[in-house]
Amino acid sequence: MKVEFFDRILIANRGEIALRVMRTCRAMGICTVAVHSDADARAPHVRFADQAVHIGPAPGKDSYLNIERIIAAAKRTGADAIHPGYGFLSENGEFTEACAAAGITFIGPTADAIRKMGLKNTARRMMAEAGVPIVPGYDGEDQSIETLSKNAEAIGLPVLIKASAGGGGKGMRVVRVASELEAAIESARREAEKAFSDPTLLLEKYIENSRHIEVQILGDTHGNLIHLFERECSIQRRHQKIIEESPSPAVSPELRKQLCEAALTAARAIGYTNAGTVEFILAPSGEFYFIEVNTRLQVEHPVTEMITGIDLVKLQIEIAGGKPLAIAQEDLRQTGHAIEARVYAEDPANNFLPATGAILEWRPPSVSGVRIDDGVDAGSEVGIHYDPMLAKVIARGPDRETALRKLLYALTRFTMLGVQTNREFLIRALEHPALQSGRYHTGFVDEHLKELINKKPGEDELFAAAAALYLHKKRQLEAAVLPNIAPNYRNNPFREPSIKLQIGAASLEVSWRASTGDEFVVTCGDWQATVRLVSFARGSVRLSIDGLQRSYRIGEAGDQIFLQRADSTKLVTRLPRYPSALSSSEHESAYAPMPGQVLRVLVEVGQRVSTGDALVILEAMKMEQTLRASADGVVEAVHVKQGDVVAPGDRLVAIAACV
Ligand code: MV4
């Protein structure tokens, strides 16, 4: 028997989606080829693949976006098809054509479909013609300021200006007052030209408080077309989705029929093949409108897989191989409920600034009904070159409440240490009454931001106590095994041991007194508690603090100690117990850690300072940041004054040794 199907597929992507595609290839008995940049030589997707090809330096444009290198890698390894994942080259018509020219099958829609849907004005016109509801607006060729202004007035404010070639919110402007219209058009036009080399704009009535709902579609090359129901994606921040679910709490069976029918009409109008998504916005009135088509497998596709039991990647591969769809619309059911949360390396309290660093520990939990698609491992470096999404956690249940509870539980049990993530932010979002009720819209994150990032009071002391007792116990055990290692330890057995720690802007001194066995009386400022060390292992402690027993996972990197509890994570830094004064030739400086403005200068030249003393208060990323002395000494120079705007790395205060 001649096997005509693919023998080997190259995955032109990285991270979780490369792994996810490879798992299906493996299940189908198809060999996999990974590609990787310098930064990813030992990445999980590279290790999982049967073969891997190095394609260039870390920046995306030199590696994962380099069409020539990827085609060459496919030829070299004899891959007969390429799966692009999402992002990178997944919606690039030129790449699709380059695959065809090289005799390699592109697993996705045609170059024609990608190009037509990549231009929002073309897509809008096609949909209008096909009878799919579109938002009142203007998508004409005449781009003169007069015509655009006239049309904006006719549509009525508020108006949303969109870049035709746009994506990710680039070139988008909401205009609420007529006097700002012209300036907004000009600036959107400049941004579109710069980002997409295409200044074409379109105008739409801006729908306030809308929900973002999309329908998954699949078409084969034999004219069969199906939908796989909707996904609700309204929990986003700056066009980055965070939480997605299906079914949408806002969609009735009647509305679902209309949405899915509209999506099929859209797909038919394009002659769509392979997997795609038709996006709609749902107005508070219950009316819905087409906004765009995504011509790729989407990040949130597992939500659909969990409620339909369908492997979308398997069907993508079969469709690309020319097979007719093996399932009919009547065979598909939306069973139960699924919710996905995206774990990003970022700091929500710092304007969601991407976080970087080495992952010390990474332990996805095993919870029935919960799927975790991750792309990193302990030892992975999270850098600046790629998308900061580390993992997706997707939970399924017979109903929404069960799915939500399982997702929350999985997030509380997911150990991730070493790099700041949005884990706690996700937990708070999922616990929020507005999300739990299902009555939310795309303004959810902005509206509730304060509640979602607020720190719980009194937690620092608990974490400081956990860190201190962990270090104490570790030192004690090491001293018992190797008495030479800590010669100073217990140099005075009657003195109360203590340790200085920094958590955020606070420096805390934790001291403890052993009573019996592993029971301690711990003091930290005004806080005092009886703490029992229930168990101790490398990387974790279980403590009973005034009778409440909980586990803390712990990762150490030099003086930095990362601690994680079910619903909270802290970075604790060890400070020298007796801060050493600078020697006469040494200098220390405080530098601006990020762009900001000087709110207050707290020291003057000649003033003596001790380690940890506040020097300057900056307002950066809308937060106050206190910069502190890193050594004992004398202020030698103050380089800034109140109101100054500073850039990252600018020197603020210099400290010299005391003489
Ligand atoms: C809209 C809209 C309201 N009215 N169009 C289009 C691209 C997608 N990423 C967001 N899009 C929207 N298009 C009209 N006519 C609302 C959104 C939208 C949105 C807009 C601003 C800020 C956040 C948003 C989140 C989801 C959807």
Image: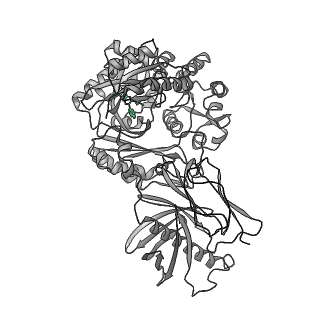
In the rendered view, does 17 fall on the left or right side of 412?
right
How far across and down, in percent of the image, does residue 575 sit? 60, 68
In the rendered view, does 78 fall on the left or right side of 20?
right
Quick one: 407 or 576, which is closer to the camera?
Answer: 576
Q: Quadrant of residue 37?
A: top right
How far across and down, in percent of the image, does residue 113 sit? 46, 17
- Taking the image in four quarters, ligand 1 sits in the one at top left
Segment colored magenta? 167-171
Q: Quadrant of residue 567?
A: bottom left
* Colour scheme: one colour
Q: Pick out the residue farthest to the bottom.
A: 494
Q: Pick out the residue farthest to the right.
A: 585
Relative to 351, is 233 above or below? above
How far across and down, in percent of the image, does residue 504 sit? 51, 60
How far across and down, in percent of the image, does residue 131 sit? 31, 15
Quick one: 565 or 604, which is closer to the camera?
Answer: 604
| Visible residue check, residue 51 | yes
Q: Residue visible at 60% across and 29% down?
A: 65
Quick one: 236 or 626, which is closer to the camera?
Answer: 626
Predominant SS along the magenta part: loop
Quick one: 241 or 170, which is closer to the camera?
Answer: 170
Quadrant of the rendering where the C terminus is positioned: bottom right
Relative to 473, is 215 above or below? above
